[in-house]
Amino acid sequence: MWIVADVIYDSDEEAREAERLVRENKLAALSVSLADVTSRLSVLDVDADGNPADWLEEVSKGEIVAVTQLPVPAQGATRIVANPDGTYTAWMVEEGMRTSDRRIIDPGALTWRDPAPLTFSDREGDAHETAVFVGNLANFRRVATALVAALEIVPGFLGDPMLPAVTRPRLRDGRYCGHGAQWGTCHLAFSGCVTPPGSASHYAHARWKEVDGVHGVPVYLHPKGDVHAPLDLSLEEARTWYDAHCSLEGLVEVGEDTFGIWTSGSATAEIDGMFLSGDWRSVDGALELMGFLACDRPAFPLALVASDVQTALVAAGMVTEDGPEDPTLEILSLLKREVVALRREVAPLLLDREADLLLAGMSTSTV
């Protein structure tokens, strides 16, 4: 359960700046200060000298007394969200989720002071010490939904955009569309030529997210950048992970055309022009798309191989630019594909040559 509250900014200069940074989605992460804490500390690992190297603090009781607006969140997707009606909502703590400071808060463990002060700092190291008062938090409550950005769903946008060429996803007249993956491209960070898979279920497993009564394929944004769900998670576990750690910035339909996997739907301006990285998970032995992550970069580690079976795939076949404006990655991908094919053709010849040399050596040694 998330603990959320309404944000009421003050009227001074510091408060106006803090509000602007949230409105422009530039600096909106949160860190919660707790008082009257009851917890239990468990040592998970020790170093060579026997000192704790990893530990976990389980909080069974605590009171929210203040919240600070920071550059980096202390826990998952905690942040202040600007709502379409001009109000702001603080998503502060998700009970049951492990924080970045080795802490997990038990469900129902927290209470709060209502209202509570909101402070602001643009630093990371000593943020709480340098924070200044900018407003109050009020109307605290628990909600069961995942963090959803200021996303306005237009059902009419969920259809084939009939793209004329390989197209980088962008907002076009309010509609978010483009390709999430391009057929035949090799991912540059993988040893072999791994290309985007199709869908045996016609993407039925991808259309699982519901917003305002509309089902579609989710597009997430991680507050710390290009961070996918761990590759050893199942389909259901990956869905839960993205809801817990990321903000939902888009809801799209997907399909296949001559060029690749197209996407079309609604999205926030925050991910306009960003790269889309697909996340595929194993379902009944086949890889199925379960959603996208909006990223700043078009390539990063993509596959987990267990018992010679590919069980997960992320960031394959990235689309870089509209049309041929920047063909660099496409050229590199094609070159890599040629190298892989050439290696497969040459390998048997090399083995034959090594066998001939071995036989020749054996013949010489017996003379």
Image (cartoon, grey):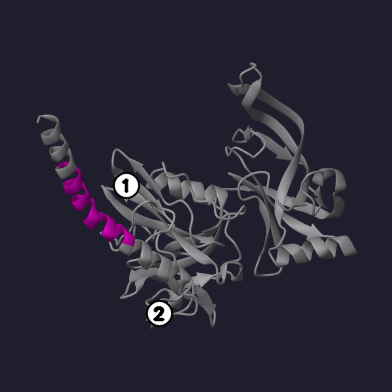
Residue 316 percent across, percent down from the top left? 40, 59
Q: Nearer the viewer, residue 194 or 67?
A: 194
Majority SS type along the magenta span: helix
Q: Is residue 139 above or below residue 105?
A: below
Q: Is residue 209 visible?
A: yes
Is residue 240 positioned above or below 8 on the image? Answer: above
| Image position, residue 18 (x, y; %) | 80, 61
List the single residue furthest toward the right. Answer: 12
Image coords of residue 187 (percent x, y):
40, 59
- Separation of disc 1 and disc 2 at Cα? 31 Å
Q: Which mark is residue 161?
A: 2
Q: Amino acid at mark 1?
A: Gln
Q: Residue at x 55, y 72 (%)?
A: 273
Mark toward the viewer: 1 or 2: 1
**Residue 296 is a magenta residue:** no
For the record, the magenta segment spans 339-355
Most foreground residue, 318 or 324: 324
User: Are discs 1 and 2 less than 8 Å apart at CB?
Assistant: no
Relative to 230, residue 207 above or below: below
**x, y percentage for residue 189?**
44, 54
Q: Nearer the viewer, residue 4 or 193?
A: 193
Q: Would you name the residue on which mark 1 appears? A: 310
Quadrant occupied by the C terminus:
top left
